[in-house]
Image (spheres, rainbow, N blue to C red):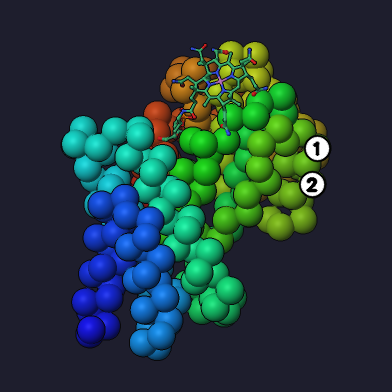
Amino acid sequence: MSKDEILRRLRDSVVNLDIEGVKKACEEALANGIPPIKALTEGMARGMDIVGQKYEAKEYFLAELIMSGEVMKEGMKILEPHIKEADVKSLGRIVVGTVKGDLHDIGKNIFANLLLAAGFDVIDLGANVPAEQFVETVSKHKPRILGLSALLTITMLELENVIKELEKAGLRSKVKVIVGGAPLTEDYAKRIGADAYAPDAVAGVNICKKWVK
Ligand code: B12
């Protein structure tokens, strides 16, 4: 099989939400000397782009977005050990996490996967992340962007707390803050002083890409 054919298979496996297909194509990519970064950016990530377009066109829905995230994760498990840091053409560093008190991480994980596919260097702090940990990580790793997720009405308040803590630490002007999660609105994001709100992960990644251009 040619390298182009393998890259096409990687792409199509993501679009078709085919976990076994993506695993096989990743193994084939490595066996055929395709650099893992190329397999990611010119294979799986192209598939993620198409999934994103299908979602925007309402051909795909949340279930497909979640599933595509899983497919990509399985592929990454195979490629990741072979990726040398120097190979990554990074659009810049971004820290993501779900705020304290909130265990919902499916949406945040989709956002993180799409960012990775787009070429960002992603530090994912997970779920239930206290404000102090966000502040410490921003201070230490100096990301260009911080992405915060909240799914519960009560943890929406924690978003504002994180932004206030960044201000107190003198870091607010050094990092762009984007927020997301089902209960949020553009209005609310403005009120708490975030730089942007995105209704879904695809829109969020597009905003982040604009910021770093
Ligand atoms: C799955 C789920 C759970 C799972 C979470 C598993 C996990 N690992 O995430 C479990 C079972 C653990 C859970 C627990 C609870 N849940 Co729950 N849960 C859900 C459910 C069904 C789906 C959420 C989800 O994953 N959606 C799919 C993802 C893809 O969507 P999303 O998160 O919105 O993310 C998208 C966008 O918002 C955006 N996005 C998300 N984050 C970010 C961040 C950035 C920066 C950007 C740019 C974009 C972005 O991108 C994503 C993709 O486009 C929702 C109902 C619903 N339909 O939303 C209830 C829901 C969120 N849960 C709810 C509740 C009440 C709870 C519990 C309190 C229940 C209980 N009594 O114990 C607990 C709370 C636990 C806690 N402390 O967090 C309520 C919240 C009500 C409210 N307004 O506060 C909901 C709305 C259900 C309901 N209708 O009552 N839950």
Q: Position of residue 77 (x, y in %)?
A: 53, 64
Q: For the point 38% across and 83% down, which residue is it?
A: 34
User: Which residue was labeled with disc 1?
Assistant: 132
User: Which residue was labeled with disc 2?
Assistant: 136
Observer able to see residue 118: no
Image quarter where the N terminus lies is bottom left
Observer able to see residue 40: yes
- In the image shown, does 174 or 111 lie closer to the viewer? 111
Which corner quadrant of the image does residue 173 belong to? top right
Report if the CB atoms under discs 2 and 1 are less than 8 Å apart. yes
> CA gap, disc 2 to disc 1?
6 Å
Q: Position of residue 124 (x, y in %)?
A: 63, 49
Q: For the point 68% across and 56% down, which residue is it?
A: 142
Q: Position of residue 159 (x, y in %)?
A: 64, 26
Q: Residues within 10 Å of mark 1 (few under 14, many from 20)?
A: some
Amino acid type at mark 1? Glu
Q: Secondary structure at mark 1?
A: helix
Q: Assess mark 2: CB under 8 A from ligand 1?
A: no
Q: Secondary structure at mark 2?
A: helix
Numbered-mark total: 2
**Horizontal relation, residue 197 to residue 145: left or right:** left
- In the image shown, does 202 or 210 lie closer to the viewer? 202
